[in-house]
Image (tube, rainbow, N blue to C red):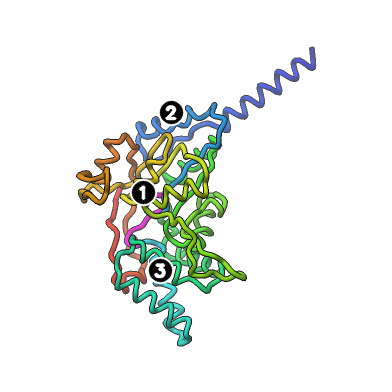
Amino acid sequence: MKRLISTILLTYICLTAAVNAQTYREIDGWSQEINDRIEGFLNTTLAMNIRKVAVFDSDGTTFGQVPYYLADEALYRYADLVLKERKDKEAKEKLKIIARMVKDGNNVGKPYVEDRVHFLAGLTQEEIERIGYDCFTESYRGKIYPEMLQLVANLKEYGFEVYILTASPEFLYQKFVSEQYGIPVTNVLGAKCVVKDGVTTDEIILPIPQDDGKAHTIETFIKTRPLIVGGNSRGDMDMLNESAGLKIVVNPDDITVRGPQDGPMNGYTVRSYWEKEGALIVKCNDVRDMKVKFHTEEWKIRQNIANPK
C-alpha cells in the first residue's frame, strides 16, 4: 500500500511539473485577443509527439531595423573605424566592395547581400562575431523587442526549438542573437560561407535566407516543417507560407501596394495580404534613438520606415 501511495504521489508530482512547465505567460504589450490566440494554439501542441519548431526572421521581427539594418551599420562602422585608417591591399579591396554596395543601394537585393559576405572574407569567425557584437552593443542593444523575448520564452516552455533566420552573414549575427534570445548559436542561420584553415572565404554556401531562400533554408538546414513562423516584410512571404500552423507578422507595411512581381501579394499591401490569409498581426515599437549616431547615415544608405507602437 505504501508503495502504491508513493507511486501515485510521484505520478502526481511529475504530471504537475509537466503542466507547470507548459503554462502560458501573457505577453505584456499585446492585446488579450492576441495572447488568447497564441495560448490557444500552443495548447493544441501539448499532445504532439513531433519536433516542435518555430522560425523567425531577424531584422524587423526579433529586433528593430530603424533607421538601418544592423548588418549595414556593422559593416560601415567597421569601414569607418578600422579600414579607413589602413593603407594595405586588403583594406583597399574591402573599401572597393563597400563603394560597390553604396553604388548599388539596394540593400535587400541579391548582389548587395552577397557583397556583405565578400566584404568580410578573410576574417576569422571570431573577428566577424566581434564586429557584429560590438555594433549591437553600441547601437542596437535597446532595440530587442520585449514582446518577442516573452514569446520565445513561452515557446521554450512548450518544448519548441526556436530558430532565427537572417540574410546577413551568419557569423555577424550569431553571437548577439543567441545570447539575447537564449538559443544555440547553431539555431541562428544566415548567409554562410566556406571556412578554410580558420579563415572565412568569399565562397557562399546556398541557400541564402532571403526571399524564397528562407523557405529553402528551412528545408535544407532545419529539416522539418515549422509549426510557427514569424516575419515582417514581403521578403518573408515564402518562409511564412512554410508554417504548418501559426503565422505571425510584425509591423507589416500597409502603404506600398505590391505589384505582379510579388506573386500572390500582387494588389495588396503586406498587411492587407496577411490579414486576408488569417495571420496574426502584432506591433512592436521600432523608432530611431536620436542619441545614437549611425555610421550608415554618412554612407547615404536608405533608411527603414519607423514603426511607433
Q: Is residue 116 above or below residue 13?
A: below
Side of 49 where 13 appears, left or right: right
Judged by depth in the image, the label closer to the viewer, 3 or 2, is: 3
Which badge, 1 or 2, is on the more N-terminal residue? Answer: 2
Where disc 2 sits, the SS reads helix
**Residue at label 1?**
236
User: Is mark 3 in CB contact (under 8 Å) with mark 2?
Assistant: no
Structural crowding at the residue carrying mark 2, measured as other residues with C-alpha within 10 Å and reported as few (<14), some (14–19) or many (≥20): few
Q: Which mark is residue 40?
A: 2
Name the residue: 33% across, 53% down: 286
Q: Quadrant of residue 112?
A: bottom left
- The front one of 15 and 258 is 258
Mark sitting earlier along the chain (3/2)? 2
Distance from the alpha carbon under mark 1 to that under mark 2: 24 Å
Q: Residue 200 appears in which quarter of the rendering? A: bottom right
Q: Amino acid at mark 1?
A: Asp
- Magenta-highlighted residues: 61-68
Label 3's element? helix
Horizontal side, residue 14 vs residue 235: left or right: right
Quarter in which the N terminus is drawn: top right
Q: Position of residue 205 (x, y in %)?
A: 49, 60
Q: Residue at x 36, y 71 (%)?
A: 295
Residue under numbered circle 3: 115
